[in-house]
């Protein structure tokens, strides 16, 4: 077995073993977050060290702290990670720049990172005030810009695990390896709620459900910032992208969103509120606009909501080039200088410029002419200096050579494998075609069968994840994983790494090879992409992939589809032709081994969908939809039932065993606003294999002043059960956990009846 036993995983994660009574993840109250709330956070006692430093800084030095440049501006013109000292002195000595980010072209080794960062700090030591530079990086699913490091499933797969402890552990490992490289600031986690699957950053989200997103996001932030191991092993987290970035109306990256205020507050804001409460140090701003208002230029979003309502006191940084785009793209600022004024006035602390010194020049001019007050600049610089002090940079800014030995640990590989195993979701398994017998000879075909990029997706050693030469030797393709599982003589495949190569789509070759095999495994899905290069126009899986399924069916052999994709790609036209369908998401370094273990029964799959898998490209709805029944105008008072008709629902996931729920009960059937409800259900493994089951508590408000959602996830837990074993799972929720945002923009829980549901069990409680 290549996976951890439940107890071994407990020990590896540093968790406490679970008893037979399980307590699930339950909701946090949101009632205090309303449009009427405008109380600013209490003024914290000023740090005297920071105030003394601030008092000695010139306007230019202050503005430099608010400016972030990419590494390209300090490197020699190559990908050799060699610092150009003259360029670096211009940036740090002449312009007092306070932050640098990124890599150039590829992932760096640990030694290269130390060389680059030490060169930066050498020059910083020669500046007047010696204020340390804070370096930032996108370490998205592991420290992906550290050469040779293990990567982990993207957030969309981690959401399928329903295991916040795993998310927390991955964040701890990422923080450790990022800080070992000498980098104290990580631009992660993504807290955007994934409700527009066309959006090319969907794989970076924790899916469509607000409760899953805020639970997993808070777990990641605590892993980055609060692992109890001190500054050598922690980084500043960055909650992103505030706010509404993931819901562009066209699905195209960085394009406008149109979000009603009620929806903005109920769906998109709670993960950021939970992140602030979890201690997130920084926030990155949405590159787009909401209802015609660019977020970078909005005092309502950046000051009224972020600061005054959520109480966030950390550093707000822009995304790439977004300040100048207030002028060049959004057209709300008539000049680049006005764009800078607008963003700073709105509440931005730091501009990821990142390719020139325009922000610095304009902001210095704005302060000196009195358009922006120095007091306003002091507010942002105070936050930036406080962040640097929190991270220990005034005491130890240089990377520590001793930390080089803390990276690339074997136990990190085990956690990566376990995460991939728990993420894989069995969507279909007719006649128990899976697991396959290890004596089977199989044909493996399709464009994702022999490529590392499709297993990893975005932010994998390079931004797009497409350079196969960057991947470490321990990363294996699906074909290599299957060969390791059942032997080379039992795997027939002609697939190649290049996604679009005709060899990946030859139906004639597939049929010839199938004659020698007992089953066909089709690896379908998407090539790697990140951000706007991943834009597509519809969700339908490409015709050349669908043709493979039709050809495979014609052979008469069992057809198993393995999907490697960052978002749901519609395959309804061929779904009936497949005997089994496995969703692997972007499982990363040990994804191939995990897929092989699932296909051949070494691991019993337990992942569940973190999104609603659409049946049609033009019929995308989330599970908590409202009023989707189709009115039958031809029949009085009649409604059809085709309004919500997904391929697979949110939370769907099969197992090689079976489970049964029983005895759903509450400790009280009527409750008040100040009461807690204890909800208990029994779950039994009724099959012949050991397995894990995600136990999810949903609610439905029977009647409300706003059309109630079909149901909403309120708590979840994951239990391990041996054949015949039964456990009791308990959740505690309150009236506030059942709240919604009403027409006035306020969180309310209205009196009345609520359905509570777990699996096929339902009970009713009444709020008095």
Image (spheres, rainbow, N blue to C red):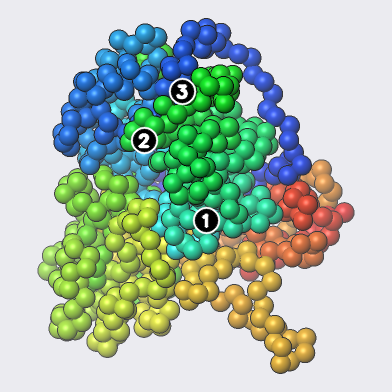
For the point 70% across and 87% down, the residue is 632
Q: Is residue 176 visible?
A: no
Q: Of the numbered discs in the image, which one, if any, rests on residue 364?
A: 3
In the rendered image, the residue lying farthest to the right is: 768
Q: x, y percentage for residue 115?
A: 21, 23
Task: Work out which quarter of the rendered image holds the C terminus and state it.
Answer: bottom right
Which SS class for mark 1?
Answer: loop
Q: x, y percentage for residue 671?
A: 83, 51
For the point 59% across and 41% down, the residue is 298
Which residue is the site of mark 2? 354
Q: x, y percentage for residue 381?
A: 51, 21
Vertical placement of residue 389 versus 293, above or below = above
Which SS class for mark 3?
Answer: helix
Q: Of the numbered discs in the image, which one, if any, rests on residue 256?
A: 1
Q: CA distance from mark 2 to mark 1?
A: 23 Å
Residue 540 in the figure: left or right of residue 642: left
Label 3 or label 1, whichever comes before in sequence order? 1
Residue 632 in the figure: left or right of residue 404: right
Foreground residue among 766 and 385: 385
Vertical placement of residue 445 versus 415, above or below = below
Q: Indicate which label's residue lies in the foreground, 3 or 1.
A: 3
Q: CA distance from mark 2 to mark 3?
A: 17 Å
**Disc 2 residue crowd, few under 14, some 14–19, many 20+, Cα 10 Å:** many
Pointer 3 and pointer 1: residues touching (CB < 8 Å)? no
Which SS class for mark 2?
Answer: loop
Foreground residue among 217 and 543: 543
Label 2 or label 1, whichever comes before in sequence order? 1
Pointer 2 and pointer 1: residues touching (CB < 8 Å)? no
Label 2 or label 3, whichever comes before in sequence order? 2
Q: Is residue 634 visible?
A: yes
């Amino acid at each position: 077995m290549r996976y951890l036993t439940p107890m071994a995983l407990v020990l590896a994660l540093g968790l406490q073993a679970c008893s037979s009574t399980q307590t699930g993840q339950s909701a946090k109250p949101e009632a205090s977050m309303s449009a009427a709330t405008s109380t600013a956070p209490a003024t914290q006692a000023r740090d005297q060290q920071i105030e003394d430093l601030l008092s000695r800084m010139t306007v230019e030095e202050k503005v430099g702290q608010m400016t972030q440049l990419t590494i390209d501006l300090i490197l020699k013109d190559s990908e050799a990670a060699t610092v150009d000292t003259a360029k670096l002195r211009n940036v740090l000595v002449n312009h007092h720049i306070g932050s640098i980010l990124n890599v150039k072209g590829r992932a760096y080794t640990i030694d290269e990172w130390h060389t680059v960062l030490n060169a930066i700090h050498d020059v910083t030591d020669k500046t007047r005030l010696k204020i340390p530079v804070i370096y930032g990086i996108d370490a998205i699913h592991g420290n992906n810009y550290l050469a040779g490091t293990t990567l982990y499933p993207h957030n969309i797969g981690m959401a399928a695990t329903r295991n916040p402890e795993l998310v927390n552990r991955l964040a701890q490992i990422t923080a450790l390896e990022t800080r070992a490289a000498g980098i104290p600031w990580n631009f992660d986690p993504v807290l955007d709620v994934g409700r527009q699957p066309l959006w090319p950053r969907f794989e970076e989200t924790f899916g469509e459900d607000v409760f899953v997103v805020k639970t997993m996001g808070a777990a990641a932030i605590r892993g980055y910032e609060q692992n109890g191991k001190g500054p050598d092993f922690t980084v500043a987290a960055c909650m992103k992208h505030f706010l509404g970035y993931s819901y562009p109306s066209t699905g195209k990256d960085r394009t406008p969103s149109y979000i009603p205020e009620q929806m903005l507050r109920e769906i998109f804001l709670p993960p950021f509120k939970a992140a602030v409460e979890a201690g997130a140090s920084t926030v990155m701003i949405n590159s787009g606009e909401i209802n015609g208002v660019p977020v970078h230029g909005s005092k309502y979003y950046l000051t009224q909501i972020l600061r005054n309502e959520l109480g966030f006191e950390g550093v707000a940084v822009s995304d790439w080039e977004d300040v100048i785009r207030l002028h060049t793209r959004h057209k709300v600022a008539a000049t680049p200088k006005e764009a800078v004024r607008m963003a700073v006035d709105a509440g931005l602390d730091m501009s990821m410029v990142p390719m020139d010194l325009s922000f610095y020049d304009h902001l210095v001019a704005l302060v000196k002419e009195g358009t922006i007050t120095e007091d306003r600049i002091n507010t942002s610089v105070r936050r930036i200096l406080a962040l640097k002090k929190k991270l220990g940079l005034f005491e130890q800014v240089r990377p520590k050579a001793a930390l080089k030995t803390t990276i690339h640990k074997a136990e990190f590989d085990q956690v990566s494998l376990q995460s991939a195993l728990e993420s894989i979701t069995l969507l279909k398994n007719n006649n128990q075609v899976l697991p396959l017998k290890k004596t089977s000879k199989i044909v493996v075909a399709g464009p994702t069968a022999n490529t590392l990029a499709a297993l990893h997706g975005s932010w994998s050693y390079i931004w797009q994840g497409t350079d196969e030469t960057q991947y470490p030797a321990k990363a294996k393709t699906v074909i290599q994983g299957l060969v390791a599982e059942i032997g080379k003589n039992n795997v027939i495949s002609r697939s190649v790494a290049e996604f679009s190569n005709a060899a990946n789509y030859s139906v004639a070759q597939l049929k010839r090879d199938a004659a020698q095999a007992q089953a066909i495994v089709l690896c379908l899905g998407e090539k790697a992409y990140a951000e706007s290069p991943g834009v597509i126009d519809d969700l339908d899986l490409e015709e050349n992939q669908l043709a493979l399924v039709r050809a495979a069916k014609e052979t008469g052999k069992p057809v198993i589809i393995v999907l490697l994709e960052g978002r749901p790609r519609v395959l309804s036209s061929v779904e009936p032709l497949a005997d089994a369908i496995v969703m692997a998401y972007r499982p990363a370094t040990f994804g191939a081994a995990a897929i092989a273990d699932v296909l051949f029964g070494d691991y019993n799959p337990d992942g569940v969908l973190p999104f609603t898998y659409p049946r049609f490209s033009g019929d995308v709805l989330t599970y908590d939809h409202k009023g989707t029944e189709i009115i039958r105008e031809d029949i009085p008072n009649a409604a059809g039932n085709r309004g919500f008709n997904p391929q697979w629902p949110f939370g769907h996931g099969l197992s090689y065993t079976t489970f049964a729920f029983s005895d759903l009960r509450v400790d009280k059937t009527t409750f008040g606003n100040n009461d807690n409800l204890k909800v208990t259900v029994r779950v039994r493994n009724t099959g012949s294999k050991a397995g894990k089951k995600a136990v999810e508590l949903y609610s439905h408000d029977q009647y409300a002043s706003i059309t109630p959602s079909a149901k909403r996830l309120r708590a979840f837990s994951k239990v391990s059960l041996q054949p015949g074993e039964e456990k009791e799972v308990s959740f505690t929720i309150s009236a506030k956990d059942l709240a919604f945002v009403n027409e006035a923009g306020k969180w309310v829980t209205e009196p009345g009846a609520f359905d509570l549901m777990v699996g096929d069990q339902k009970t009713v409680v009444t709020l008095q």
